[in-house]
Each structure stands twice: as C-alpha cells, then as structure tokens.
Image (spheres, rainbow, N blue to C red):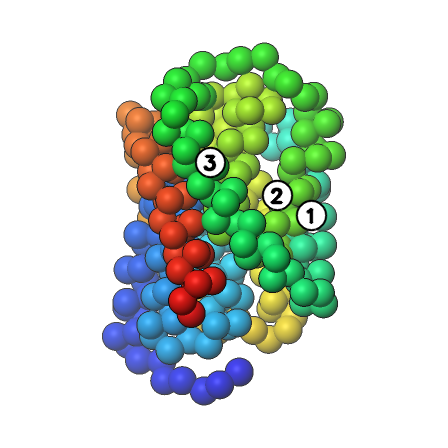
C-alpha cells in the first residue's frame, strides 16, 4: 500500500464525512458516495479506500440495527436464517471479486440503480402499506438475500436500497419495515467483507477509527429521525441517492 500522510485535519475531515454518510446511509443507503470520495481526496489509495469503507461502514449499520432492536422494531430471533444467507453471499462475493474479471458488472450497477430510482419515483405509494408476500421467508433467504449479499461483497453501491426494495416487492413490507431489516442485512454483509479485507492488510485503521466514530454519531441521529417522523425522508432520499450513485458510476466508466 502506498504511503500517505495522515494529519489531524484529515482525521477530523474523515469524522465529519462519516457522520454525514452515517445519517444518509441509515435512512436511504449510498453513504459510500460520501466516504469513498472523501478518502480518495485525502490521498488514500483506491483499494485501501474500498477496504476502509467496509471497516467504517459496518459501525453505522450496527448502530442503526442496535437501536431498532432496543426499540422493539426488529427481532433477531426471527431472521437468523436471513443473517446467515447474507453473510454467505457477502463472503462469496468478496472472495470471488479478487479472482475473476467482473468488469461487466460495473455497467450493470448504474442500470439497476436507475431502475430502483425510477420505480420509487413512479410509484409514490410503494411501501406505504403492507401487502401480500410474493415469496416465503425461506424463499427470500435462498434467493434475494444471498444474491444482494454477494453483490455487496463484490462491489457494493446501493446495497441498502436493494435490500429495502426486495423486502417491499418480495415480502410485502412497508418501506419503514424493509429499511429497518435492510440495516441489519447490510451490517452483516459489511462486516463479512471487512474480515477478508482486514486479513489482507488493506484497511487504514487510523482513518477507519475516526470514521467509525462519525458513523456511530450519524447513525444514532438518523435512527431516531427514522422513528420520530422521519420516515417521510426515506423515499426521496432513496431516489436521490440512487440517481447520484448511478451518475457517479457512469461517469467513472465513461470518463475516468
């Protein structure tokens, strides 16, 4: 990993970037749009930035998940099978991305993100009320959860949004219910991939530590926002972040 200077100013900047990302990520996903460019701007090498992003990102999803469990909005006993499925998918994706050419997936990501954004935009009542589930919990755990987990381990942009949308479309959940469970699944996929990155010595721990604290603060604020009337922010933020993530990915593919 190339050497670069870590100053107090950089550490403080990383804390603030992670705080904002933790708030956005908890409500809608896409916090990596803030944290990864911030690390690159500070001089962190690209691979190290991706690895460090996994290390700091799991704190935000863990914090949000813990708040939801403590508030009684999420029961871990009901989703252990899904947790295992998400972990297996993420570990598989993280392992495979280091061994095969997945350039074609980079073109698929912006298309999927645009589909999610447009779908939310055109269906304002999506997730307003619970509907009949289209697949069983077991079927969901054998298909959508490991597939999205694999995607997060391999690439990652928009994972929280994909988990939330799948919960609405396949399990008939409300947007709030699906978002709460998406935080748990995203935590599992983040920490699973982080373990493999840490084993490879890719994480810049000094920066990761400052960003973990920022994520903690941002996720705490967002979790209480979500449960105290902030639910209305989720849909517009999901649309905005999906459009932004898609635009950034296309820009990278076409001009970088």
**Can you identify the residue that label 2 sits on?**
148
Query: Residue at 69% of width from left, 47% of height from top?
Result: 89
Instruction: Indicate the quadrant where residue 117 lies.
Output: top left
Q: Which residue is mark 1?
A: 89
Horizontal arrangement in the rendering, residue 19 relative to residue 69 (left or right): left
Nearer to me, 160 or 100: 100
Q: Secondary structure at mark 1?
A: helix
Q: Quadrant of residue 211?
A: bottom left
Seen as rendered, the residue at the extreme front is 254
Residue 116: mark in rendering: 3
Residue 189, given in percent of the width and then of the height, sits at: 60, 49
> How far separated are the C-alphas under marks 1 and 2?
7 Å
- The residue at the point 31 percent across, 27 percent down is 232
Tag 2: Cα neighbours inside 10 Å, few (<14), some, or many (≥20)? many
Q: Earlier in the sequence, mark 3 or mark 1?
A: 1
Circle 3: element type = helix
> Which residue sits at x=40%, y=60%?
251
Give yes or no for contact between labels 3 and 2 (Cβ–Cβ under 8 Å). no
The reply to whether the C-beta atoms of the residues labelled 1 and 2 are less than 8 Å apart is: yes
> Which quadrant of the rendered structure holds the C terminus?
bottom left
Q: Earlier in the sequence, mark 3 or mark 2?
A: 3
Q: Residues within 10 Å of mark 3 (few under 14, many from 20)?
A: some
Determine if residue 21 is in view.
yes
At 65% from the left and 38% from the top, the residue drawn is 145
């Amino acid at each position: 990993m190339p050497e670069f200077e870590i100053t107090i100013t950089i550490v403080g900047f990383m804390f603030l970037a992670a705080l904002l990302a933790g708030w956005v990520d908890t409500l809608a996903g896409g916090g990596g749009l803030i944290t990864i460019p911030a690390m690159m701007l500070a001089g962190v090498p690209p691979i190290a930035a991706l690895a460090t992003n996994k290390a700091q990102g799991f704190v935000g999803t863990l914090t949000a998940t813990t708040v939801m469990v403590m508030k009684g909005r999420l029961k871990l006993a009901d989703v252990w099978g899904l947790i295992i499925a998400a972990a297996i998918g993420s570990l598989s994706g993280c392992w495979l991305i280091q061994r095969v050419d997945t350039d074609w997936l980079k073109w698929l990501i912006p298309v999927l993100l645009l589909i999610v954004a447009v779908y939310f935009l055109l269906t304002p009542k999506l997730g307003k009320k619970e509907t009949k589930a289209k697949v069983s919990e077991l079927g969901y755990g054998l298909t959508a959860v490991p597939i999205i987990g694999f995607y997060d381990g391999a690439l990652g942009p928009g994972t929280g949004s994909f988990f939330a949308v799948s919960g609405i479309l396949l399990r008939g959940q409300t947007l709030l219910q699906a978002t709460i469970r998406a935080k748990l699944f995203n935590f599992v996929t983040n920490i699973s991939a982080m373990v493999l990155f840490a084993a490879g010595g890719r994480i810049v721990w000094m920066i990761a530590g400052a960003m973990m604290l920022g994520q903690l603060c941002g996720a705490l604020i967002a979790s209480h926002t979500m449960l105290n009337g902030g639910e209305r922010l989720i849909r517009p933020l999901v649309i905005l972040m999906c459009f932004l993530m898609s635009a950034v990915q296309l820009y990278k593919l076409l001009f970088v």
